[in-house]
Image (cartoon, grey):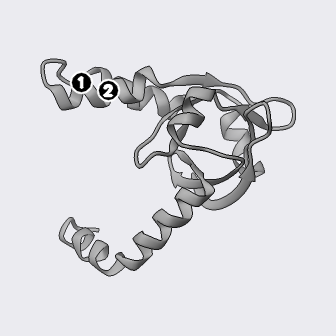
Amino acid sequence: MFIGEYSHSIDEKGRLAVPTKFRDDLNRGAVVTRGLDNCLFLYTFEEWEKLAKKLAELPISQAKPRAFARLMLAGAMDVELDKQGRVVLPEYLRKYASMKKKVVVAGLYNRLEIWDEAAWNKYKTNTEKDSNEIAETLGELGV
């Protein structure tokens, strides 16, 4: 289970040191892809296979499911942790997420999200401001 929020830096070669507590799970294989809200999603290989299977089953005759599958699947890249626990984030994904040097790695149960630090801080501030409204909506969904 991935939880928590961690500040890290991307080096000049596009490498990100994965938080130590997550490395064992990601050592068996991982996939990074375009996420939502202009961040990146990092999945264990097992979690990625579950999601990819669902995406592949979406109806290709409908524009929105087709577009979402393209966003996630075409943007995906297998990544491996090196001996220092780093993954290389491809340039096209760093560009998609407008990543500079400072990033935040956020654990969200079955995936990690990787955010440009400024974008994360803005998103978090706005979400915290709207937390009561969000909680009400989730209450209506049974959460």
CB of mark 1 within 8 Å of CB of mark 2?
yes
Q: Is residue 138 above or below residue 88?
A: below
Disc number placed over residue 41 in the picture, else none: none
Residue 52 on image: x %, y %: 39, 25
Q: Residue at x 66, y 46 (%)?
A: 100
Q: Mark 1: which amino acid?
A: Arg
In the image, residue 61 lies at what x, y percent? 13, 18
Relative image position of residue 102 (x, y in whole percent):
70, 53
Left or right of 15 on screen, residue 67: left
In this orientation, which residue lies closer to the viewer: 60 or 48?
60
SS at badge 2: helix
Neighbour class for label 1 at 10 Å: few (<14), some, many (≥20)?
some
Q: Is 45 above or below relative to 22?
A: above
Up the image or down, 22 lies above or below 54; here it is below
Q: Position of residue 122 (x, y in %)?
A: 50, 65
| Residue closer to the observer: 72 or 119 | 119
In the rendered view, does 139 fall on the left or right side of 21? left
Categorize mark 2 by other alpha carbons within 10 Å: few (<14), some (14-19), many (20+): many
SS of the residue under disc 1? helix
Q: Give the residue at the far right of this rendering.
A: 83
Q: Is residue 97 depicted above or below 141 in this figure? A: above
Kind of residue at disc 2: Ala
User: What residue is shown with label 1?
Assistant: 66
Q: Is residue 97 left or right of 117 when viewed as pictured?
A: left
Q: Which mark is residue 69?
A: 2
